[in-house]
Structure formats: C-alpha cells, structure tokens
Amino acid sequence: MALGIYKPEQGYWMRVLTACLVAAVTLATAGWLWDLGPQLADKLPRSIYAMAINVTIGEPKPAQAIELLGVAPTPDAPAPKIGTAEALAYNPDGRVLKVTKLVMDDKYDPAQITGIRAGDALAAGVIPRTVKAQDLVEPLYIQITLAGIAILAGTAFAYYICGLRQGTVEFLIATDSEMKRVNWSTPREIRGSTLVVIGACFTIAGALFLFDLIFQALFKAGGVLAP
C-alpha cells in the first residue's frame, strides 16, 4: 500500500469535513479518557509506602531489608515485629523513608508501625499513622498517555480513511462530485418557500379549527355531546 495520498487533487472538501468529524470524535474520546485517568490510577497496585521518621540511629540504605516494629506491650518490653519491608530511598532532610515490598503480619496494618530496624546497624522511630501508600504512576502521566494514544489513533484513522483507503476515498470523491451538482436555492427562493410553508400551516390549522367547530355543533344538535 502506498504511503502517499490517493488522488490528492480530488474530493478535497469531503475529505476535510470527514477529517473534522473524526477529529471531533477523537477529542471527545481523549477528554473522556483524561477524566478516566485518576480512576485508573486508584486501581493500580500501590507497592511504595512513605513514612515519617522522628528518631534515627543509622541511615537506611537502598535495598536494605527492614523489620517493621509495633507498639511494645509494656515500657520495658521490646517492640514486636509486625512486618517486613525493603528500603527504597531515604530523605534525611525531610526524614522520610520510602519502602517497597511491605508485608504486614496478620491483625496488623501499616498505621500501627511505630519503628523500623535493620539488624544492629539501624534503628528508627516512626511517627504513628504517617505510613501512606503512593501511586506507582502519577495520575497525570496516565492521563497524558491515554489522551495521547486516543489522539494518535484518531489521527491515523483519519489519515487512513481520507487518504489511503481507496474505497473510502473513491466514495468521498464521488460524494464531493455529486454535491457540486446540487442546485442550491437562492435567498429569495428560500424566503418565498418559507412564507409558503408558514401560510400553509396557518391555512391548515384554520381549516381544522373550522371543521372542529362544525362537527361540534352537529354532535351537540344530534345529542351526542352535551350542550
């Protein structure tokens, strides 16, 4: 199949109008997908968690195995291990640790994490209820991707049916040729036809109203209708 436009010198306006129609549908679809992006982002699995740390002994290293600690049953008792995770990145200025592969023991959830430990090299306190899941992909990136795919697909479809597909192009060329043969009415003829239609409507309405009055009088005279 040739990459060039098939018969580019023919059917110009029908091709343009068809492309505009495809563009309108494409933009509507892209807008719908743009609004759908945040909903899709919410359905993606969230494997990255961020937690705020208030006290740190040592510094978490990327890919370091971490034990997640809960609240100690008594002040003198050690904090129990309630899950595991893997360090992803640590921001010492903001004291925010990002972890992945977070696995909680039964009956525990991330909101109950109060500390982390990685052997003897690291111990840290976690501010309670600061462990929050983060999106793997930003919703904006999903929106841009979906809308971009819709626009590219619409553009390719318009190019195909208006320029490459011979059967569709021949139909558009034939339609454009027939449109050139249409005898368009002049403004004077349109005004005259409009007045004729309006006059006919009023005439028919008046005739129906007159017949209604006549039949109403006859039915009342015959006793069919109450006077």
Image (cartoon, rainbow, N blue to C red):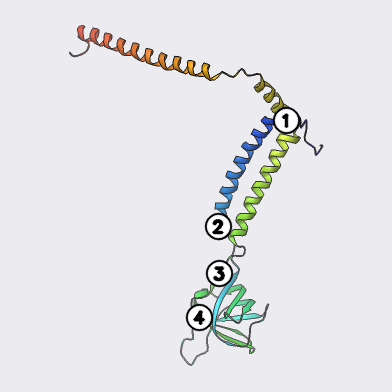
Q: Is residue 23 left or right of residue 215?
A: right
One can see residue 102 in this view: yes
* Quarter occupied by the C terminus: top left
Instruction: Give neighbour class at mark 2: few <14, some 14-19, many 20+ (Cα, 10 Å).
Output: some
Instruction: Give neighbour class at mark 1: few <14, some 14-19, many 20+ (Cα, 10 Å).
Output: many
Identified by mark 2, the residue type is Pro
Marks 1,2: beta carbons within 8 A: no
Give the CA distance from mark 1 to mark 4. Answer: 67 Å
Front tag of 1 and 2: 1
Mark 3 falls on what kind of element? Answer: strand
Marks 3,4: beta carbons within 8 A: no
Front tag of 1 and 4: 1
Give the CA distance from mark 2 to mark 3. Answer: 15 Å
Identified by mark 1, the residue type is Val
Residue drawn at x 56%, y 18% is 186
Front tag of 2 and 3: 2
Q: Which residue is mark 4?
A: 127
Q: Which residue is mark 2?
A: 38
